[in-house]
Image: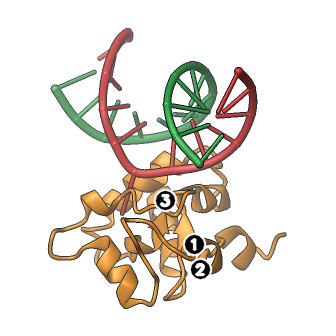
Chain colours: A orange, B red, C green
Amino acid sequence: MDDFSSDVYKVVREIPSGRVSTYGAIAKALGLPKGARRVGWALNQSFEVVPGVPAQRVVNRHGQLSGAIHFPPDLPMADQLRAEGIKVVDLQVVDFAEVFWDPVVELCGES
DNA sequence: TTGTTGACGCTCA
DNA sequence: CTGAGCGCCAACA
C-alpha cells in the first residue's frame, strides 16, 4: 500500500475509543489539507487491512457518517459508534463537537 | 488522454 | 440555514 494510506491507518488507529475525527483533519495532519478525498479512498482499502482500521471513527466536517453506505451491512458504521458510546442519530454524531478528536492537536500538540 | 465520479472542505450569495 | 460553485487528489471507463 502507499505510504499515505499507511499513515492514514496509523493516525486513525490512534483515535481513542468514544471519539471521532474528520477526513480534513487527518489529511491536514498528514500534510495534505486538501487531500480529504484521498483519506476516504485510503479508508476504503482499510477493510482489507490486517490490523483493522476503526474507520467508523472518521466522519466528515459535519459529523455525518458519509461513509456508512460503504460499510458492510453486518457492521453498520453508526452501530459500531454507538457501541463505543458515541450518540448517532440519522447517520450524524450528536455531540460531535464534544467527541471530536483532532490529530493535528492531539498528536503534534499544535494549537 | 480526457471526462466523470467520489467516505471532502471552504467560500459566497 | 441552504444551496451553488470551485478547488483539491486519486481512481476508473
Choose mark 1 or mark 3, whichever is in front.
Answer: 1
Pointers 1 and 3 in contact (CB under 8 A)? no
Nearest the eye: A103 or A75: A75
Q: From the image, tell me which residue sits under label 2.
A: A99
Residue A22, relative to residue A103: is it above or below? Answer: above
Q: Residues within 10 Å of mark 3 (few under 14, many from 20)?
A: few
Q: Which mark, residue A3?
A: 3
Disc 3 element: helix
Quote the CA–CA distance across marks 3 and 2. Answer: 28 Å
Residue at image position (50%, 87%) is: A18
Image coordinates of residue B4 in percent, x first then y, are: 31, 21
Q: Chain of mark 3?
A: A
User: Can you say which quadrant of the picture contains the C terminus of chain A?
Assistant: bottom right
Pointers 1 and 2 in contact (CB under 8 A)? yes
Residue at image position (45%, 74%) is: A57
User: Can you say which quadrant of the picture contains the N terminus of chain A?
Assistant: bottom left
